[in-house]
Amino acid sequence: MKITRKATAEWKGSGKEGKGTVTTDSKVLDGTQYGFTSRFEDGKGTNPEELIGAAHAGCFSMKLAFNLQEEGITADSINTESKVILEDDGINTIKLSTRVKASGLDQSKFDELAKDAKENCPISALFKANIEFEATLEN
């Protein structure tokens, strides 16, 4: 199966003073603003690191849900956070953490499935950065 998704970005002006917008084909992002202040300060708008984090958290959660499904388990909830850390002009660390509620899942199997999801979700495979990982199974 081949799936193609597209997003576009438009930037106007200099790096610090300029402004940009990002749009996705789905229109979930539709002219969403980004710029220096939303990336390096607390300004309004999105930024590339936030979008990478959202993609990573979503991809991991879906991969883990498929891993659980293969074991005949449906999660009550999978809550994942991906902190993308931009430092010294590079992304060297991503902190991925998840909290999962799922009946009938023991700790050993959970650890195995979560590790597989971290290593094999397509977004994780893109990163050269170190992915620090924490997975918690809640009762």
Image (cartoon, helix red, strand yellow):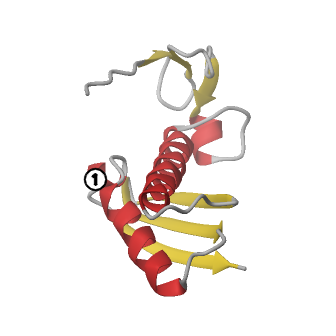
In the rendered image, the vertical position of residue 110 relative to residue 12, given as above or below: below
The spot of residue 87 in percent (x, y) is 44, 60
Quadrant location, the N terminus: top left
Q: Can you name the residue that lies furthest to the bottom here? A: 108
Question: Which is more toward the observer, 42 or 16?
Answer: 42
Crowding at mark 1 (Cα within 10 Å: few <14, some 14-19, many 20+): few
Who's the residue at 49% across and 39% down the image?
A: 48
Question: Which is more toward the observer, 81 or 77?
Answer: 77
The spot of residue 134 in percent (x, y) is 52, 76
The type of residue carrying mark 1 is Ala
Quadrant location, the C terminus: bottom right
SS of the residue at dot 1? Answer: helix
**Left or right: residue 11 compared with residue 32:** left
Who's the residue at 53% across and 32% down the image?
A: 16
How many numbered discs, if any?
A: 1
The spot of residue 58 in percent (x, y) is 53, 46
Question: Which is more toward the observer, 100 or 37?
Answer: 100
Who's the residue at 32% across and 63% down the image?
A: 119
**Left or right: residue 123 compared with residue 137:** left
In the rendered image, the vertical position of residue 9 relative to residue 48, given as above or below: above
The spot of residue 70 in percent (x, y) is 41, 58
Residue to which mark 1 is pinned? 125
Q: Can you name the residue that lies furthest to the front here? A: 72
